[in-house]
Image (cartoon, rainbow, N blue to C red):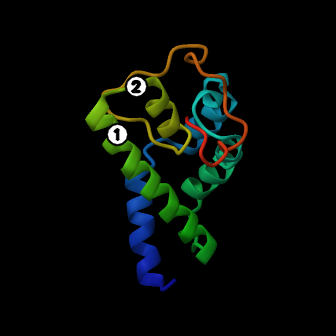
Amino acid sequence: MARKACAVVRKEFNRSVNMSPDAIRKWAKDPRAKCASFESTRKRLPKLAALKAKKGEWTEADCNYARRVVNFNTRMQGNVKTHGCRVRNVTSLLNWGRKPPGCKMPPPGCSTRKPRTTAPKKGAGD
């Protein structure tokens, strides 16, 4: 990815990820983080915190990961605007480094669903 394109992605990433690296690390340890996202997403939280704190040049892998974060946060923020501050939407956004403005933190414990550990099988309802 060209340096200029990466600079644009970095700017979008810093706008999209509105939690500090410390807040991301703290959230990663919170049991509520397990309520709405796949385990693989939660495992990336330390990488997200490190990228938010990184001062120097980003690698191409950093830029690609940041673009993925921005895209997810944009889509999920649209869900929050459309459907309101549902616990699962807010939790998902927090797992990607975004505290949705105007939404409260999820209550302790999970909703009626069990925490996800793997992606659903194709054709299975979610």
The residues tagged by marks 1 and 2 sit, at their Cα atoms, a distance apart of: 9 Å
Q: Is residue 107 left or right of residue 104?
A: right
Helix, strand or loop at label 2? It is loop
Label 1's element? helix
x 51%, y 61%: residue:
68
Q: Is residue 6 shown above or below 67?
A: below
Disc 1 to disc 2: CB gap under 8 Å = yes
At label 2, which amino acid type do we have? Answer: Arg
| The residue positioned farthest toward the bottom in the image shown | 2
Mark 2 neighbour class, 10 Å CA radius: few under 14, some 14 to 19, many 20 or more: few
Q: Amino acid at mark 1?
A: Asn
**Residue positioned most to the left:** 82
In the displayed structure, 43 sits above or below 64; it is above
Pick whichever of labels 1 and 2 is earlier in the sequence.
1
Residue on which the image places disc 2 = 86
Residue 101, position as x, y percentages in the image:
32, 33
Which corner quadrant holds the C terminus?
A: top right
Q: Is residue 118 left or right of residue 9?
A: right
Q: Residue at x 56, y 39 (%)?
A: 95
Which label was assigned to residue 79? 1
Compared across the picture, whether 28 is left or right of 89 comes to: right
- Relative to residue 77, is residue 11 depicted above or below? below
What residue is rendered at 58% in x and 13% in y? 108
Q: Quadrant of residue 34?
A: top right
Which residue corresponds to the image point at 51% horizontal and 42% vertical from the top-left? 20
Horizontal and vertical percent position of residue 83 = 30, 31
Locate residue 85, reporting x and y percent: 36, 26
Instruction: Pinpoint residue 67: horizontal percent, then vertical percent.
Output: 48, 64
